[in-house]
Amino acid sequence: MAEKIRVMIEEEKVNQRIKELGEQISKDYAGKQVHLVCVLKGGAFFMCELAKRITVPVSLDFMSVSSYGSATKSSGVVRIVKDLDEPLKDQDVLVVEDIVDSGRTLSYLLEMLRDRGPKSVRLCTLLDKPDRRVKDVHVDYTGFEIPDEFVVGYGLDYDQRYRNLPYIGVVELEDDAN
Ligand code: IMP
Ligand code: MG
């Protein structure tokens, strides 16, 4: 079976929305420094684009977590594969994620980050699939709410591929015979 990518959100729309999010965040954090925490690998593309659109002082850190479960379904038990380099004490933390799906990964992660004594913790996600929510997660900034479809691009992968697509797409499997 060959794969085909159907465009769900065009590159221009994604970029425009990231610009708007950057402006909103810059307003909300006026007079402060925002500490962006990127959840690798999916959040990396979004975080770089978003950071360029933020006009208040920005610092960055990265963490990598692995969620026990199958390729397309997380369990909510999260193991830290790479921890942050810097402590979060007294920081205004903005967690930057690619997508909130069931919410299991983030509800666990946000609680863990809050335990480290930051001044504040907020969440910014490029995509949100609210229909799939199992765990309640408060999202402060959302790029796009999308229907329950498996998407790729802008950091999101299907079996580690397609992260580099500059738009959001849906993987469709087609019969080679057609
Ligand atoms: P959650 O714990 O179910 O919210 O899972 C979140 C993680 O699952 C995301 O950070 C992604 O890595 C992955 N994920 C969820 N939905 C998709 C999707 O549509 N495409 C690619 N990865 C996804
Ligand atoms: Mg992710």
Image: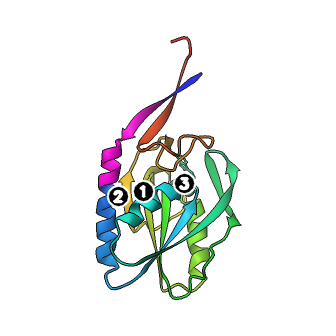
Q: How is the image coloured?
A: rainbow
- Amino acid type, residue under disc 3 in the picture: Gly
Image side of residue 164 versus residue 82, left or right: left
Q: Nearer the viewer, residue 98 or 108?
A: 98
Mark 1 is surrounded, within 10 Å at the Cα level, by few (under 14), some (14 to 19) or many (20 or more) other residues, namely: many
Residue type, numbered disc 1? Leu
List x then y, in percent, for residue 87. 60, 82
Q: Is residue 99 visible?
A: no
Q: Which residues are magenta?
A: 5-16
Dot 3: within a 10 Å radius of its alpha carbon, few (fewer than 14), some, or many (20 or more) residues? Answer: many
Q: Secondary structure at mark 3?
A: loop
Q: Residue furthest top?
A: 177
Q: Which label number is shown at residue 42?
A: 3
Please tell me which of labels 2 and 3 falls first in the chain.
2
Residue at the (50%, 65%) spot, across then down: 136
Residue 86 is inside the magenta segment: no
Q: Is residue 146 above or below residue 64?
A: above
Closest to the observer, 104 or 123: 123
Q: Which residue is mark 1?
A: 126
What's the distance in space between the residues labelled 2 and 1, CA to CA?
8 Å
Mark 2 Cα within 10 Å, few/some/many (few <14, many 20+)? Answer: many
Q: Residue at x 63, y 41 (%)?
A: 159
Left/right of residue 5 with respect to residue 10 in the rendered view: right
Q: Earlier in the sequence, mark 3 or mark 1?
A: 3
Q: CA distance from mark 2 to mark 3?
A: 15 Å
Quadrant containing the N terminus in the rendered view = top right
What secondary structure is marked by label 1?
A: strand
2 and 1 marks in contact (CB < 8 Å): yes
Examine the structure image and report whether residue 14 is included in the region drawn in magenta. Answer: yes
Q: Residue at x 29, y 61 (%)?
A: 20
Dot 2 beta carbon under 8 Å from ligand 2:
no
Mark 2 lies on residue: 18
